[in-house]
Amino acid sequence: MSAPTPADLPLDGKVAVLTGVSRPGQVGEVVARSLAERGASVVLIDRTGVEAEARAAELRGRGLRATAARADLTDGAQLDAVAATVTREFGAIDALVNIAGGFSMSGKVADSDPDAWSKQLGTGLTTAYLTTRAFLPLLRKRQGAVVFFASAAALPGGKIAEMSAYAVSKAGVITLMRSIAQEERATGVRSNALAPTAIRTAANVETMGSAPRYVEREEVADAVYFLCFSEAARSITGQVIQLG
């Protein structure tokens, strides 16, 4: 089989930074692979760098372009250092995909643990804020795009009883996304969010079984590609796309 040509690799020369890619079987694994297979250089960030490097090595083993970086996503200084490294290596980036987060039930508000509330908001919202803040200067250089991961739980009519901390964190992500869309309009940086129902990840299948109707990880990856790189999405900003 002949080697791929530039026409076969529409993202050749593009750079995408992703969080939430450390665990195999999760959505970040497929999103990173999808972008890399299309020709992008992907930079994968996680707290220790160990699992991100494992995912990057898997991609490099397939002849794809991938590097890993270590940063606690709740530490702005560490993220600034990663952004400086990415600047030296690539100069700028075309996409930032904020997948990192986590889900936990917080119980009824009256009985909830304030520490659990703070932890959920830190994991689901502060990480997205600090990561985007660190990489916006690199996105401006190429009029790039940011994709946030919200949730159907944060949309009108979503089931939120006993999971208020999670829902509030995702509602905050949507507000953050819209703020950036308005603030960066003049720079050409676009900002959108995906709000999926349950995704078919290894963790969800283990917890809920295979019976529920899941959003497939490949469908999520296609939506990320569309929002970040499709010409058809070049004027789409400030929007929440529901999946499932």
Image (tube, rainbow, N blue to C red):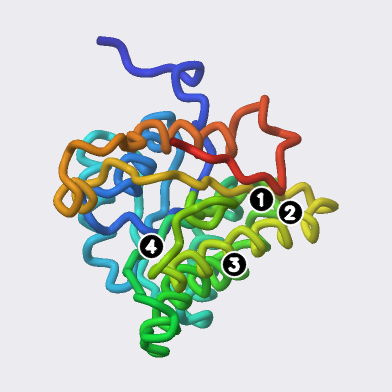
Mark 3 → mark 2, Cα distance in angstroms? 14 Å
Comparing marks 4 and 2, which lies closer to the viewer?
2
Q: Position of residue 26 (x, y in %)?
A: 27, 49
Q: Taking 151 as reference, is 48 above or below it?
A: below
Q: Nearer the N terminus, badge 4 or badge 2? A: 4
Q: Taking 13 as reference, is 178 above or below it?
A: below
Q: Nearer the N terminus, badge 3 or badge 1? A: 3
Q: Nearer the N terminus, badge 2 or badge 1? A: 2
Instruction: Report the amino acid beneath label 2.
Output: Ala
* Quadrant in the picture for the N terminus: top left
Question: How many labels, in total?
Answer: 4
Instruction: Report the amino acid beneath label 3.
Output: Gly
Pick the front one: 91 or 79: 79
Q: What residue would you read off at disc 3?
A: 172
Instruction: Report the amino acid beneath label 4.
Output: Ile
Residue at image position (62%, 45%) is 240
Q: Image check: 181 left or right of 150?
A: right
Q: Taking 49 as reference, is 96 above or below it?
A: above
Q: Which mark is residue 45?
A: 4
Mark 2 → mark 1, Cα distance in angstroms? 5 Å
Image marks 2 and 1: residues in contact by CB distance under 8 Å: yes
Mark 1 → mark 4, Cα distance in angstroms? 20 Å
Pick the front one: 210 or 85: 210
Q: Position of residue 58 (x, y in %)?
A: 21, 45
